[in-house]
Image (cartoon, rainbow, N blue to C red):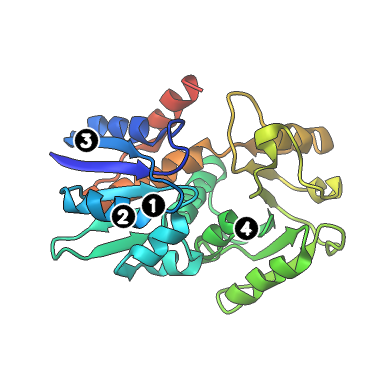
């Protein structure tokens, strides 16, 4: 039986074992999937032992995505662009492939919810690792342009400069947003986890059609509520579909089978 696990610290809250077990049942695959919680500085020892013991692949979450990026023998283009790895796969020759499926998970969920992204004008709030991991897949999906807004404008500009050869991408601080309209706004910060909001003007929602929060909860997140208060006609969604989507992409990397994500999203949401 092929064995997999998710690495993180803390990790007991992770939905990955449930999601991948459901994927396996749906696609008639036989796998075992568990959790691994190394010490904060113990990732390399833990992952080496993991693969030595015969495990095939791993998902990697906070705080180990950079460690996994450095550990991999080879990186996919999207992992290289993200400068982080959330999926490791031991190939038949023994080498370790590092991939990042976060951006694919976001793009697939946005398309599932609201159709193609071609021509859309996007605002990404925040300039951390979550943002960096999704820019290339979004540009590859042929969005018209991306604007990154961050509390520290220079950090947003660094990200924009990094990807400017891939598409139209601009940046600013929260307080000096350009006077342009956005079709889709994505909150890439973790502000909603404790009921907070990004410190950005509510005018961003004027004429916007969609607002997406990468975090997720049993009820609407604070960002989703705020967006609808500002623009009642706006359509909102949380990041549960992104979570399941990135997991499905990892499952495909390992098993070469694509699970159907909508039934799994429904099951996981009922358990929140």
Please give the name of the residue rendered at 78% of the width and 35% of the height, measured from the top-left corner: 226
Q: Is residue 161 left or right of residue 228?
A: left
| Observer-nearest of 70 and 201 | 70
Whether residue 36 can be seen here: yes
Q: How far apart, in angstroms, are the residues tagged by discs 3 and 2?
A: 21 Å
Please give the name of the residue rendered at 61% of the width and 36% of the height, measured from the top-left corner: 237
Whether residue 256 can be seen here: no
Residue for badge 4: 128
Residue 45 is labelled as 2
| Observer-nearest of 32 and 39 | 39
Q: How far apart, in angstroms, are the residues tagged by discs 2 and 1?
A: 6 Å
Please give the name of the residue rendered at 35% of the width and 64% of the height, measured from the top-left corner: 71
Residue for badge 1: 42
Residue 184: percent from left, percent from top: 67, 50
Pointer 3 or 1: first along the chain? 3
Pointer 4 or 1: first along the chain? 1
Above or below — where is 112 with respect to 147? Answer: above
Pointer 3 or 2: first along the chain? 3
Pointer 4 or 3: first along the chain? 3
Q: How far apart, in angstroms, are the residues tagged by discs 4 and 3?
A: 32 Å
Q: How far apart, in angstroms, are the residues tagged by discs 4 and 1?
A: 23 Å
Q: How far apart, in angstroms, are the residues tagged by discs 3 and 1?
A: 23 Å
Callout 4 crowding tier (Cα within 10 Å): few <14, some 14–19, many ≥20: some
């Amino acid at each position: 039986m092929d064995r997999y696990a998710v690495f993180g610290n803390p990790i007991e809250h992770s939905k990955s074992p449930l999601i991948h077990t459901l994927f396996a049942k749906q696609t008639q695959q036989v796998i075992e999937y568990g959790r691994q919680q190394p010490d904060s500085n113990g990732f390399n020892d833990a992952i080496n032992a993991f693969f030595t013991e015969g495990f095939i692949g791993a998902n990697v979450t906070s705080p180990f995505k950079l460690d996994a990026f450095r550990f991999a023998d080879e990186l996919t283009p999207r992992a290289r662009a993200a400068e982080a790895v959330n999926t490791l796969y031991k190939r038949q020759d023994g080498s370790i492939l590092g991939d990042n499926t976060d951006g694919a998970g976001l793009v697939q969920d946005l398309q599932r919810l609201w159709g193609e992204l071609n021509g859309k004008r996007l605002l990404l709030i925040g300039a951390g690792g979550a943002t960096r991991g999704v820019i290339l897949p979004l540009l590859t999906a042929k969005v018209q342009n991306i604007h990154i807004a961050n509390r520290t404008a220079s950090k947003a500009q660094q990200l924009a400069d990094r990807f400017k050869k891939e598409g139209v991408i601009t940046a600013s601080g929260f307080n000096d947003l350009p006077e342009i309209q956005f079709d889709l706004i994505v909150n890439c910060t973790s502000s909603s986890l404790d009921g907070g909001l990004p410190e950005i003007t509510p005018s961003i929602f004027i004429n916007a059609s969609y607002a997406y929060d990468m975090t997720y909860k049993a009820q609407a997140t604070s960002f989703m509520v705020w967006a609808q208060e500002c623009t009642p006609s706006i359509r909102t969604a949380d990041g549960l579909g992104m979570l399941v989507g990135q997991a499905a992409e990892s499952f495909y990397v390992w098993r070469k089978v694509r699970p159907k994500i909508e039934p799994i999203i429904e099951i996981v949401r009922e358990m929140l």
